[in-house]
Image (cartoon, rainbow, N blue to C red):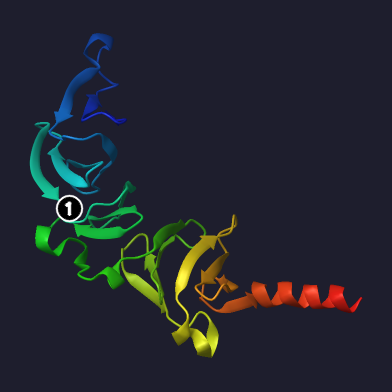
Amino acid sequence: MISLGNEIYANVWAPESLVSDIHIGKLKGHKKGIVDGSFLNKAPYFVTIDEENTINFWDMVTLMNVQTIVSPQKFKVEGLFVLENEIFWAYGRRFFQFDALNVDEDEAGGMKSEEDYPLCAYINYYQLSVFVVKKTEVRMYDVAKGQLYSLHTNLFGDDSAKAEITKLKIDKRHRKAYVSNNRGEIFVINCQNGIMMKNVTQYLEDRKNIKRNN
C-alpha cells in the first residue's frame, strides 16, 4: 500500500505484516511535492507525478526509481489516470498521454503546437470514457483500451467553423454535457453520440421575448 500527500516522498506500507513492521520504506527521488500516484496494471511498478510534472517509475520489489521523465511543459497537474494497457494520462489544465512500455521524453503526449493542447478532460463514469476537449473538437476515448472511439468536430451546427469551444461541463448523470463557445452560446449535447440536443442561449432569448410580449 502506498500513501502520499504533498511530500517529496511516498510511504510504502505492508498491512499484512506485524504491527511493528507495517512501514517498509519510502519512494524518494522527487524534488517537489508529489501530486498523485498509481500502480501500473500488469507490472510491479508504481508511477508518481510531482508539482513540476516530473514523472518517476518505481520498482515495488526494490523500491528503487527505475526511470524519470521530465515534462517539457509546465502546467498545474491534477492527477494521473492509468488504463489497462499500460497507457496513462497526466491531466490538469493540459493533458498528456504516456505509454509506460515505450516512453520517449521528446514524444511524450504527442502534442507539438499550442493548438493541440486540450482545454480540459473529463471522465464520464456512465459511458466509461474520457472526454478530451479542444478548441474545435471533442474526442472520446475508451477507458479500458485507451483508444479513440469517437470524434466530434461539428458541435455547433453548420456555422461551427466560426466558433471555438471555450468550456465543457458534464451533468451529474453523465448523459449530457453543456458546451460553450467564444460567441457566447451554450449548447447541450448527447454524451453518447455528440449530437446537439438544445441551444440553451436561444431558449433564454425566446423566454425574454415572451416576457416582453406579455
**x 13%, y 49%: residue:** 70
Q: Looking at the rendering, which quadrant does residue 177 occupy?
A: bottom right
Q: According to the image, label 1 marks what residue?
A: 71
Of the pair 159 and 13, the residue shown nearer to us: 159
Q: Residue furthest front?
A: 212
Q: Looking at the rendering, which quadrant does residue 14 occupy?
A: top left
Question: Which image quarter is the C terminus in?
Answer: bottom right
Identify which amino acid the numbered label 1 is placed on.
Ser
Vertically, is 6 above or below 21? below
Question: Which image quarter is the N terminus in?
Answer: top left
Q: Position of residue 91 (x, y in %)?
A: 33, 53
Evaluate whether residue 104 shows in this view: no
**x 25%, y 12%: residue:** 18
Q: Position of residue 59 (x, y in %)?
A: 12, 38
Decide if residue 178 is on the left or right side of residue 211.
Answer: left
Decide if residue 62 is on the left or right side of residue 24.
Answer: left
Vertically, is 101 above or below 48? below
Q: Position of residue 67 (x, y in %)?
A: 8, 45
Of the pair 46 and 93, the residue shown nearer to us: 93
Vertically, is 9 above or below 160? above
Q: Residue furthest bottom?
A: 158
Of the pair 203 and 103, the residue shown nearer to us: 203
Decide if residue 72 is on the left or right side of residue 134.
Answer: left
Q: Residue furthest top?
A: 20
**x 38%, y 70%: residue:** 134
**x 31%, y 63%: residue:** 145
